[in-house]
Amino acid sequence: MGVNNIVIPEKPKGQFSTPYPIANLMVKKLFKFRQPDPEDRLLDPGCGDGVFIEAVLEWCNRKGIKLPRILGVELDSRLASICRRKFTKYKEVTVTQKDFLAEDFGQFDFIICNPPYVRLEELSEEERSSYRRIYKTAFGKFNLYMLFFEKALKALKDGGRLVIITPEKFEYTLSSAPLRRLIARYHVEELHHLKEGIFKGLVTYPTITVINKVDSSPTKIIKRDGLSFYASLPKDGSPWIPVIEGKFTDMTANVTLKDLTKRISCGVATGKDNVFIIEKNRVPENLLEIAYPTISGRDLTPEGIRVSHMMIIPYDREGRLLPKDKLKDFIRWIKTYKKVLEERYCVRKGKRAWYEFHERPPMSDILRPKILCKDITKEPTFWIDEKGMIVPRHSVYYIVPKNYSLLHKLYKYLNSEKAKRWIVAHAQRATNGFIRLQSNTLKDLPMPQESFKIATIS
């Protein structure tokens, strides 16, 4: 792989220095079953100011063994210079200022890494297409650290060891499925989930992954509460959460929630809620015809659904933008906010008129009796919009049955302990012990066949 095949970023992104105690812990894991010798090659891609190299030197000095040949790769010229000066007296250490993802550095016996955490939205269009062309793990809404995983495994010799610290999200997100399939080909020796917040100013739910490049076998899983156990990870790219959480449910079925529903989606994204959403008693009378009751996640309460605001929606009940002659009052009213609305990404890219929403709302589905839930919650709980007049915002998911007769039966089952246990076991993790409900998780919820027959919706 050469620099002509991939776009070099203008400047490094997503750098977070590894605390020295964590670096020491990772080096200990790196050499747990095999000490390095002088002929071995060790790589630290994205080496920063050299915290891992320093920890390796200290470990070897403490054990009284000779150093392996160490290569540090760093894109940031300032950090590369600092790192190079730090280890000048060690002939075994080489530091080069290059892009790890764009160069071939040969094969290594040991790799230790804290890759940059860079979301897809932070990459340029040119970078995205370039990475997608080169890397199998550049799939969906990928993060740059996933590509470091793939490149490191490619650079690792058979029988070599990789220790890498990343956010835990690769264990369960849809976009990480190709990465999970790749990793599961080898022995994922350990998944060590660290306490949140070890990187100051960043909550990542960090996880140390130890991979031995040999045939796969059971994985040691260490949870944040200190509990540890061994388990076999799925090899097909499916989420690892049920295994990691130790919640092995026996719920399997030919029928899932997706089979019984017309739509399972996140609520409406206006791109500027503070413009389009108004308190009920402040909606201008001439806009009442296009004003709909709306809720956010906080409006779903133990006492029921609280509706205190209205959403001004310039679309008809089929989700089509209303013609300008029917929007005269609306455009006159919203002109006050024209400047801030034009700053939205969807308008700047020419995808929407300045007074449109960020996404066109599927009103024909939204304005139906439906089931609602929060996107982030401690415990999955569901509510019914019996009349089908509430427009959920982007912090609410809505579930529209194919058949209205299933509405209450689905609502009852979704709130059952059995369904909740399955959802918790398969949902993504958010901060502070919360879980994140997403359409892909909800769609896969197995339904008891004795209660939900496909025949009832055919």
Image (cartoon, grey):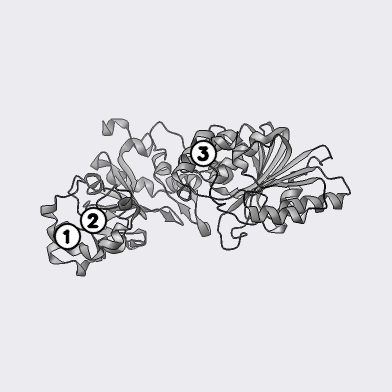
- For residue 131, which numbered disc appears in the image? 3
Q: Relative to 180, does residue 343 appear above or below in the rendering?
A: below
Sequence-wise first label, 1 or 2? 1
Sequence-wise first label, 3 or 1? 3
Mark 3 → mark 1, Cα distance in angstroms: 43 Å
Give the amino acid type for the residue marked by disc 1 in the picture. Phe
Residue that sits furthest to the left in the current view: 325
For disc 1, the marked residue is: 330
For disc 2, the marked residue is: 355
Label pair 1/2, CB-CB below 8 angstroms: yes
Q: Is residue 316 left or right of residue 58?
A: left
Mark 2 → mark 3, Cα distance in angstroms: 35 Å
The residue drawn where x is 31% and y is 31% is 454
- Residue 41, given in percent of the width and then of the height, sits at 76, 39
Q: Determine the secondary structure under disc 1.
A: helix
- Residue 191, given in percent of the width and then of the height, sits at 64, 45
In terms of image quadrants, where is residue 393? bottom left
Label pair 3/1, CB-CB below 8 angstroms: no
Sequence-wise first label, 2 or 3? 3
The residue drawn where x is 25% and y is 44% is 365
Residue that sits furthest to the front in the current view: 4
Q: Is residue 11 left or right of residue 107?
A: left
The residue nearer to you, when weighing 382 against 182, is 182
